[in-house]
Image (spheres, rainbow, N blue to C red):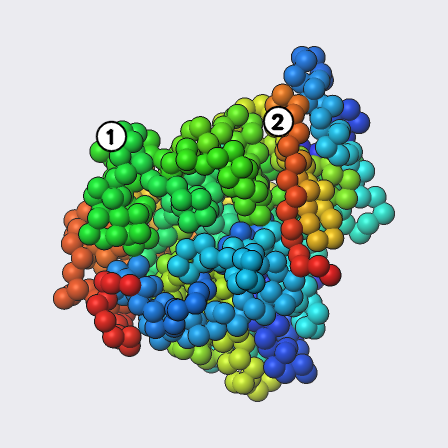
Amino acid sequence: MDEIVRENLDCDILIIGGGTTGCMAAVEALEREPSLRVIVLEKAHVDRSGCLAAGMNAINAYLNPGETPESFTRYVRADNRGLIREDLVLSIAELLNSTVARVESWGLPILKDADGNYRRRGRWNIRINGESLKPILAEAARKAGARILNRVVATNYLVDGGQVIGAMGFGVRDAKFYTITAKATICCTGGASGIYRPNNPGAAAHKMWYPPFNTGAGYAMGLRAGAEMTSLEMRFIALRTKDTICPTGTLALGFGAKQVNSLGEEFMVKNFAELGGNGAPTPYRVYGPIREMQLGRGPVFMDTRHLSAEKARNLRAAYLDMYPNIVLYWAANKFNPSREPVEICGTEPYIFGGHCQAGYWIDVKRRTTLPGLYAAGDVAGGAPYKFVSGCWAEGIMAARAAANECAKTPRADSKQVHDEADRVFRPIRRTAAGCGGIAPSEMEARLQKVMDEYAGGVKTYYEMNEASLKVAAEQVERIHRQVRYLLANDPHELMLAHEVIDRVEVSRALVQHLLYRRETRWPAYQTRIDHLELDDINWLKFVNSRQGPSGEIRIIEREYEQIVAGDRYRG
Amino acid sequence: MRINREKRGPGCGEFADEAAMDRALVEAGLGTCNDCRGLDEPRCVEVCPGDLMAVHPETGAVYCRSDADCWDCFACVKACPRRAILVRLPYELADYRAALIPRVHKNSITWSLVKPDGEIETFEVVTRKER
């Protein structure tokens, strides 16, 4: 490869990831202090990047009339089996409604009833027409004065004596090596999909729910820099429509569809009445149907046969705001939800902190364990049930802290920069030199196979035990030792190479977390078949980890603190 | 992902239903790709969250690097100024063929759902408050 072209930039606040959280963080920082120089680093294009690329049809974390931050926290605690960071969830809850109003003022249409009140769609949900939610957020960040660098992939933090002072990466369009120094850095990359083998094979592999382009970069960069992570073992397995892997909340909350098995039984009511039946905690709403399939009573469905023709049309319109492909799929297959129930399935496990709580261990100001580095949104841990509006709240809190705590002018260490440029471009250099090696897609397939078969993927109904996890750990280590053989023909493939490197990095830590928690706290998300009981005496605590200088994963236990009074299993 | 370069629609029209569908596609507004000549970067290439739409280095034509990597987010479909991109579902999942074509307005989208028999159903969806 030719000489590396370098781009060196400096700013006050560097935001890595211009998705749901990053755009909001940029606006907050610049509205508080317009003189700040804020850079948003985005690997795609901010107009349609991250989780909101296709849109959203509801806000799912909102305090409807009569609810309080405490009632929200109690609900989230019970929904997550009595173990959350209550300080983090409370702080999010306090900002939810004002944040939604702020985005409404930027142009988001929120559905209202005849009296002008937001239209509810469940206890914590309101209906929106959010097809353009992402362009609206991107426009706000641009108008606020953020400098947006589209098509730049972040690969590692710049670190000076333990302090994070920016990040490095490469341009997917210009193939430049970027070194960006910053007084404060906020990680908003989102979580990780593609760790496990996806539901659909081959040409349909990316028909997944969580964005296939969220590949764990934020976690991997944090692990490599020695940041503490929490609760990676609390994977998220979503209950989704078969084949298209679209959200089912639209069916359940928006259109009153109940889960039924192939015998027509409402199995959630039958088997989980004491946990709330159809309103049982979220892990049970995926564990329940998986169990039906395991016991030979599948396929399982959301029963939509009560819908009138008009309601079925409204249902399709609601999906157009968020997952248009299910509307196309139903038309192609001549499927009518008024006549037939919608088949559902569990997804491959995803790792992120927006629904579950995998991510950076942060304090209430969203400071990570590394000075100068903040984390917010899906990449931040300890606060499940944040969804879109909770991610906004965290972006705001991280931006406030970062703006107040900007350190002195940073200076990048030239050896660190040189070594990273060498690592980043190795796959292209090797290919140009005619070396043999491994294509990113090959490594991805191997990783996904190992994780699926030994670390609780779809194949084993999400079940795992110590023996299988030890196999996973060994196999992932083997793959990890081979990342240096990856090949890339061009900057696009270089991006794919670094995506799989980051996924391998996340998998190493994830398997250690899964091994360590010897109970089953969250059925399906974390079914330890050799430790099936929930065990509050020994395991009411957080499993955290930190990668040491030679790459070893060290597990750290952290205490749980109850702040909001009441029964932890009642919301 | 299918980039349309034919004026009459992408089928050959050998069968009656295929011909009806092609007529419906044109009626629903399907246009033809001109590779956004004159722009620094074609709109679909600019916006794709997976960096999957690209300009072929030799022919200058827009193409999709990998259908299997597409997330079906419709970002390119909505961004296309000539409505020339169709999301094609993998045959593993869906019959040949239906289409979903959005007309993007300032504050709304009109979606035309073209069914395999050529029937068109339209949906009007608000995307922004009045501005």
Q: Nearer the viewer, mark 1 or mark 2?
A: 2
Tell me, yes or no, whether the two marked residues, 1 and 2, touch with CB atoms within 8 Å: no
Q: What element carries label 1?
A: loop
What chain does badge 2 belong to? B
Residue depicted at x 59% and y 75%: A28
Instruction: Report the residue at 47% width, 43% height from top.
Output: A246
Q: In this view, does A25 lie above or below A488?
A: below
Taking the spot 57% from the left edge, 34% from the top edge, the residue there is A328
Percent x, y of residue A264 = 29, 31
Q: Give, as a three-letter code, the residue at label 1.
A: Gly
Q: Nearer the viewer, residue A382 or A155?
A: A382
* Residue in front for this viewpoint, A218 or A34: A34
Which of these two is toward me, A328 or A256? Answer: A256
Quadrant of the rendered image containing residue A176? bottom right
Residue B115: mark in rendering:
2
Tell me residue A151's x, y (percent).
65, 57
Res. A279 visible in picture: yes
Label 2 CA crowd tier, 10 Å (few <14, some 14–19, many 20+): many
Q: Is mark 2 on a helix, strand or loop?
A: loop
Q: Residue drawn 74% across and 23% down?
A: B23
The amino acid on which the numbered mark 2 sits, given as a three-letter code, is: Lys
- Can residue A453 be seen at all in this image of the molecule? no
Q: In screen coordinates, is A323 left or right of B84?
A: left
Q: Is residue A24 above or below residue B23?
A: below
Image x and y of residue A51, in percent: 53, 54
Which residue is denoted by mark 1 in the rendering?
A296
Percent of width and height locating residue B75? 64, 47
